[in-house]
Amino acid sequence: MNAKTQKLIELDKQYLWHPFTQMADWLASKPVVIESGEGFYLTDTEGRRYIDGVSSLWCNVHGHRVKKIDDAIAAQLDKIAHSTLLGLGQTASIELAEKLVQISPEGLEKVFYSDSGATAVEIAIKIAYQYWQNIGQTKKIKFISLKEAYHGDTVGSVSVGGMDLFHGIFKSLLFETFYVPSPHPYRFDGTEKECTEYSLAKMEALLKEHAGQIAGIVVEPLVQGAAGILVHPKGFLKGVEALSRKYDTLLIVDEVATGFGRTGRMFACEHEAVRPDLMCVAKGISAGYLPLAATLATQTIFDAFLVAGDIHKTFYHGHTYTGNALGCAAALASLELFEENDILGTLPEKIRLIADYFERFEKLPYVGDCRQCGMVGGIELVADKETKEPFLFEQKIGAKVCAAMRPKGAMMRPLGNVVVLMPAVGMDMETLQKLMDIIENTLKHDLPKLTCHTGLDSASK
Ligand SMILES: *Cc1c(COP(=O)(O)O)cnc(C)c1O
């Protein structure tokens, strides 16, 4: 390790508190420090290069240091980096809002900016809540969401989240939400159809039980990312949409992870021709360059806040950096690249490539379900292939497998026992293939060895 790396790690350990990290483990570890990136590769302070297999936590789209986006940000810098949207307009944020409405599912007409996925969801919840207050349906104050859902880490978005590990400790801080079991064949013994029907029936029962009290249903469309890449059966989202209409409540889709090409279409909703009332986008919106997010709303919702001079129906929410000009400039350049490079047109070939590898992975020892939703993948590692007995949490098998990929040149990050595959949608076929080869090699040669170095007997659980 060179002296510079050593010094940086020392300073990191002295001054930083990392997200979602048990810092005691971090302090005992030898972290990699990323210094630069180029295309789909990251470079650390030791000069080692890694394929960015999780697109810098699910947000990078066209790669790193993409000339067009770099130039767009520089050009925006020559004009202005940031000016408030409170009481003023701003060119880049206006131009991007028009574009976002054009590419979004039909019916979404208005754009409310913020700066992270969590705030985009927070805003959707508050808009939905106030919408019903504004139109006099004041009893609609509760939300329905899915078990194991993840919508971000602010108190409101945690309240509609369903992951016990993240949310349990904050229980008394959160508002009450009604949960529906997620429709996962991996979680139930049943066909996809049975899981879908079961989950939708539970949802309908809640809507009946709390008739006239549900402000909105919040869902991650098609795939629950942070839950471990749990892919919903076809038709589930459409079923949720139908229930939201039948019981006169709002459909809020959290496209923070799925938006901007991840699932093979621009937005996941398009796969089932679903028209949400509110849609949250973040992560990929600025191509992974800058913190930017947006909550899109229908005209009907927007109109419920319109009363000239009325202070009570105004939506009182905003962030200092709302609609940041640099972020909007990056987003505009990214959307141009989607067209210029026909990104969506290149996806079927890449999606097939991943599917081919996944088919082979599923035959390997200690590999369970390999789940895929477009360019999103989850490789579940299991202690027993027959019974699908999971590895013990303490074995940290996902983390160990990802660590084994680093010397081979891939940067991956697991979710528990699931190795997450989230390449940038703009990744070229050659790099994608290289990445898949590294994963295959690690699953074949390293995984079996890693399972027996744990000192724990998984069978004796
Ligand atoms: C990542 C994520 C969020 C939170 O986004 P942040 O920008 O990290 O706040 C919300 N919803 C989903 C579905 C996500 O994957």
Image: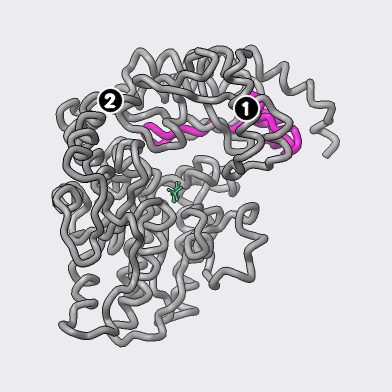
Mark 1 sits on what residue? 9
Of circles 2 and 1, the one toward us is: 1
Label drawn at residue 66:
2
**Quadrant of the image occupied by residue 375:** top left
Q: Quadrant of the C terminus?
A: top right
Q: Callout 2, which amino acid?
A: Val
- In-image side of 431 versus 269 (left or right): right
Q: x, y (%) of residue 291? A: 36, 45
Q: Residue 30: in sight, yes or no?
A: yes
Under circle 2, the secondary element is loop
State whether residue 362 is above or below residue 241: above
Q: Residue drawn 22% across and 52% down? A: 105
Q: Nearer the viewer, residue 436 or 197?
A: 436
The amino acid type, in three-letter code, at marker 1 is Ile
Give the residue at x 18% y 82%: 307
Q: Quadrant of residue 204?
A: bottom left
The magenta span reads 372-401
Q: Is mark 2 within 8 Å of ligand 1?
A: no
Q: Where is residue 262 in the image (x, y as percent from the top left)?
A: 35, 37
Q: Are marks 2 and 1 in contact (CB under 8 Å)?
A: no
Q: Residue at x 54, y 46 (%)?
A: 227
Q: Nearer the viewer, residue 49 or 396?
A: 49
Point out residue 134 in the picture as x, y percentages from the top left corner: 29, 82
Whether 270 is drawn above or below 143: the answer is: above
Horizontal and vertical percent position of residue 284: 34, 40
Above or below, 259 against 109 in this view is above
* Residue at 45% in and 70% down: 143
